[in-house]
Amino acid sequence: MLLRSVQRVSGLFAAQFTRASYAQKYTSLRVQLTFEWLCNGVRKTVPANVGDTLLDVVLENELDIDGFGACGGELACSTCHLILSDDVYNNLPNPPSEEELDLLDIAPIVTDTSRLGCQVVVSDEMDGAVIKVPEFVVDTRA
């Protein structure tokens, strides 16, 4: 249990450090991201600040994803599960941590390019990306 706690804290630190590094480098850079709901094919393109997480983008743009980010980005649930394109997934600077993979293991409708939105930091290379929203989310917290 202690090892899990240390991994969780170190994973959060890495995500926060990465976000801060991007924010310092790209203080005002914004990109456009398109979210596509798999349940109905609806698409919505929104602005996103480079350095924010995808969780931040969804919340700031008030996208209608029921239950999204229930743990507040603490890497404790899988409600911010999103599906990335192969290109975006393969170009992310940070691979998924063991903690993130464990949460994705119990999330519904997981693909090879699934990530938790709280762990993906927006970069300028993501401009124009289409991010898929699974048909439903399940809060996996006990």
Image (cartoon, helix red, strand yellow):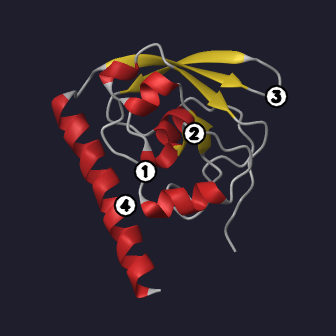
Say if mark 2 contacts mark 3, CB within 8 Å.
no
Which residue in the rendered view is the most extreme toward the front?
A: 112
Q: CA distance from mark 1 to mark 2?
A: 11 Å
Q: Residues within 10 Å of mark 1 (few under 14, many from 20)?
A: some
Q: Does residue 22 appear to the left or right of 90 in the view shown?
A: left
Mark 2 residue crowding within 10 angstroms, few (<14) / some (14–19) / many (20+): few
Looking at the image, which residue is at 53% across and 25% down?
85
Rendering quarter of residue 23? top left
Precedes in sequence: disc 2 or disc 4: 4
- Badge nearest the viewer, 2 or 3: 2
Confirm whether residue 19 shows in the render: yes
Name the residue that disc number 2 marks: 112
Say which mark, if any, is on residue 96.
Answer: 1
Tell whether label 1 touches label 3 (CB within 8 Å): no
Q: Is residue 59 left or right of residue 32?
A: right
Residue type at numbered disc 4: Leu
Depth check: give the residue in front, 133 or 23.
133
Circle 4 residues within 10 Å: few <14, some 14–19, many ≥20: some
